[in-house]
Each structure stands twice: as C-alpha cells, then as structure tokens.
Image (cartoon, rainbow, N blue to C red):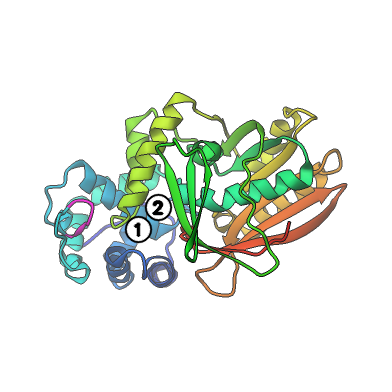
Amino acid sequence: MHYDRPNPHAVDLDELAARFRRFATTEVEETSPLYHALALAVAGDRDLLLLAAEAQPGQPPANMLLGAVHLLLLRTPDHELAAYFPDLAAAPGAPAAAVPAFRAFCATHAGEIAALLRSHLVQTNELRRCAYLLPAFSHVASLARAPLALVEVGASAGLNLLFDRYAYRYQLGDVALGAGDPTSPVTIDTRCTVRTGAELPLGMPRIAQRVGIDLNPVDLADDEAYAWLRALIWPEHADRAARLMAARRLWLTQPPALVRGDAAEQLPAVLDALSESVAPVIFHTHVLNQFTPAAAAALESLFVDLSARRTIYRIGNDLGGGTPKQYVLRLRVYRRGIMQETILAHTDGHARLIEWLASP
C-alpha cells in the first residue's frame, strides 16, 4: 500500500516502529499470535507506520491501529482478512499468513482507519483487573475502618467501579476460592499465588460512594461507544468479550457517576463532594503510562497537597516490576503531606496471574 499522510505533525518512524515491536514482544507475544504477527509487520512497513501515526498524541499506536481495523471487520466481516480473526472465523488461518490481507485491508480502508485514529482513544475496560482490585480495596477497608468512596482515574465506562457486582474465582494451586456475588452474570477468574506470611483479603468492603473521572467518559448505552470497547479486545480473547457484554447489561441497570475532564483538575472538587465519614480511595490501572513524567509528578504533588485535610488512599497498577511484562500493584497512603507506600502484588497485564505480597 501507499499512504500519503495528510496530518502535518512530524513523525519519528524509527521510534514508532520500535513501539510496535515492543507491543509485539511484551504485550501480545503470548496472548495474541495474530496481533503479534501484525504488529511486527507494521514495524517494518513505512506506509502502515504513517497510517498508525494518525493516532492522537499520547495514544498507544498499536492498540489504536489494530483496534480500528478490528472495529471495521466486526462491522462488515466480509473481507478476506476476517478469515484470520479467531472471533470472526470458525477455523482461522495461520497468523503469519494474515499479513498480505492486512496490508490490503489497510490500503482499501485507509481513510476510515485514519478517521478512527484521529477521533478515538484507547479506553479498555479490562474487567479481570477487578481480581486484584477486590483484595486491594479489602486491604484498604481494614486499614481505614470506614466505608470506602471509590474514585477511578481513567475510568472509561466505569466498569471497575461496579466490582462488587461481579463473582470471583481465585485458583491457588489446587484450591479455588470464591468471592463476590455468586449470582452475578459476570465471573472473573484468575490464578493466584500468595507469598509466605501474606494473606489474600477477599472480604467485600462497604462502598458508600463511587465516581469515575475520564477525559472522554464512555456511555455504554451508546452502541457505537460499546462497539469501540469491544473492538479493543484482542480477537483471541473470547472470554473477555463475553464478560464485557455481560457487564454492559449490569451497567445499563445502574450506570456509575462519571465526570468528564482532566484528573488533576477534577480531583479537588470530587474529593470535596465526598462525605467526611468515608475513606477516599483513588485508583487507576494502566493509566500512568499515558502520562508524561511531568504530569505524573504533578499528580503526585496534588495527592500530597490534598492529604493536608484528610487521609487519602491511592491504589495504582502500572508497569515497573522485574520484567517488561510485570505490573506492580501499589498502595500509597497520604496523610498530612506524608506518603507511605506498600507493594500489594505483582500482576501480568490482564490480571490472569496475581502474586499477592501484602500482609494484613
């Protein structure tokens, strides 16, 4: 294909190619053979890189390009490329063989793909992340000894805020532990190890208030918005797609409160609106990677400043473990301008595996 890029901002194609290679090797090599093959193909194709560069600054280009292609295929799965997508073909072809069809699809639909990249954001709602949020919230509840007020930064549709409406199954070797609402249509399962001396807390905390903050909150009553979230799920992950569909039905019965705006600008007002009798828990998952170092530092300073009036609990799960694929779940407690940090767990990117580290 040949792509003439109308968007004028400069592109470092070498850096963009490196980002696609990192995506292939650190995010999808073990969990999406199709996206692994396609991401490596994009990394070596100048025109595909130019197309991917249409994504808005700060957005992960591989997720955006592959999500846009997936969305178009889900709408009209009649292109030959659909034969390689496990969620569109009963017997999908070999991933490496999909590259020519992928290039042809991008050439044919370049205008539509570019428009999606310019207008959309990566806003995944990975429900399995609730598998580590539940014990994290339970841990905080034992410290705070008060009902929790949950504030999610980068909430998207706010599905994580509904964590107490899901059923959970934790596989610890030969032992399975259940938690949550056993009648829920959404079941979240994960494998878990617990470090010697640690304890996995699975008691459901009392939630007094919940609110999400996002630059572009997602309304799951909007079919197009839901379709974009669905397209961001990798094609091999049928279980994630099924959970999203079931969670949407729960969301429609009782949507969480969502605030549009920048977290640093909205947090002071959101915290001021919380009851004095609750413990504020601000949490985020896989969000800080989209912050510049300066923005992340400013957010940290804001938490320190806000803690002058009340204790704030912050839970975050972001890259930073011993390997490029390992995420670290941290609890930071801000009290009178002083921050104390506890590492609660290590996880993989989709919370399929949790190593719980914290003691009661």
Outermost residue, top side:
253
Q: Quadrant of the N terminus?
A: bottom left
Outermost residue, front side:
174
| Residue 234 image-quadrant placement | bottom left
Cα–Cα gap, marks 2 and 1: 6 Å
Q: Which residue is mark 1?
A: 52
| Residue stretch in magenta | 84-88
Amino acid type at circle 1 is Ala
> What's the residue at 80%, 57% (across, down)?
340
Q: Which SS type dominates the magenta stretch?
A: loop
* Percent position of residue 186, x then y: 42, 41
Amino acid type at circle 2 is Ala
Mark 1, residues whose alpha carbon is within 10 Å: few (<14), some, or many (≥20)? many
Q: Nearer the viewer, residue 146 or 194?
A: 194
Q: Quadrant of the C terminus?
A: bottom right
- Is residue 300 magenta-colored? no
Is 132 rendered above or below residue 257?
Answer: below
> What's the residue at 44%, 60% (across, down)?
10
Q: Secondary structure at mark 2?
A: loop
Is 314 rendered above or below residue 43?
Answer: above
Q: Nearer the viewer, residue 278 or 77?
A: 278
* Percent position of residue 158, x then y: 51, 37
Left or right: residue 61 versus residue 301 is left
> Can see residue 121?
no
Q: Which residue is mark 2?
A: 55
- Is residue 86 magenta-colored? yes
Q: Nearer the viewer, residue 161 or 124?
A: 161
Q: Contact (CB < 8 A) between labels 2 and 1?
A: yes
Left or right: residue 181 versus residue 333 is left
* Percent position of residue 23, x then y: 41, 67
* Percent position of residue 239, x then y: 34, 50
